[in-house]
Amino acid sequence: MAAMYLDDVSLRGVFFQVVATIGSDYEHRGVLTALIKNRNLNEEVLNRMLDSASGISSDYEKATFLLEVSNTYTGDVRLKGAFLKVVETIKSDYERGRVLSALLKNKQIG
């Protein structure tokens, strides 16, 4: 179903509004993680995904999602700023460090 909503410009906003209402951080991350598997995501959808991830309260779930995204998309210079903006919302030093360490290891920042 997500592909149908994401392909239609008029429905993208509605899709992400609904995702924002998911009360469980685990399930919120699960929806965003499922979207990553679609290799044809455009820049707007990727930015909306990152924006949605910033609404995840759990630092663990947020960091886990960012690590999943980093394996695929952070090499894209257009997304690096949005990605790092979400990293800044992680309150836990450990979780933030986990994400930044992975980025440094993969030479995606630094």
Image (cartoon, rainbow, N blue to C red):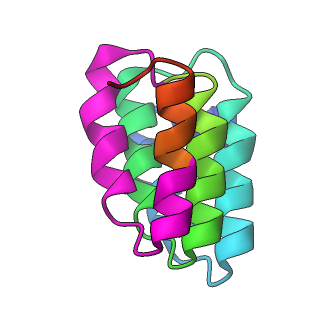
Tell me the quarter of the picture where residue 71 sits.
Answer: top right
Where residue 9 appears, as percent x and y from the top left, is 39, 33
Q: Main secondary structure of the magenta part?
A: helix
Above or below, comparing residue 62 to residue 7 in the picture: below
Above or below, comparing residue 15 to residue 68 in the picture: below
Where residue 32 appears, as percent x and y from the top left, is 63, 50
In the displayed structure, does residue 93 sit left or right of residue 60?
left
Tell me the quarter of the picture where residue 5 sits.
Answer: top right
Where residue 35 appears, as percent x and y from the top left, is 67, 38
Where residue 29 appears, as percent x and y from the top left, is 66, 60
In the displayed structure, does residue 51 sit left or right of residue 16?
left
Above or below, comparing residue 25 to residue 43 in the picture: below
Can see residue 12? yes
Residue that appears at 74% across and 28% down? 37
Near-viewer residue (43 or 17): 43
Question: Residues in magenta?
Answer: 74-98
Residue that appears at 35% across and 31% down? 44
Q: How many marks?
A: 0
In the displayed structure, does residue 107 sit left or right of residue 22?
left
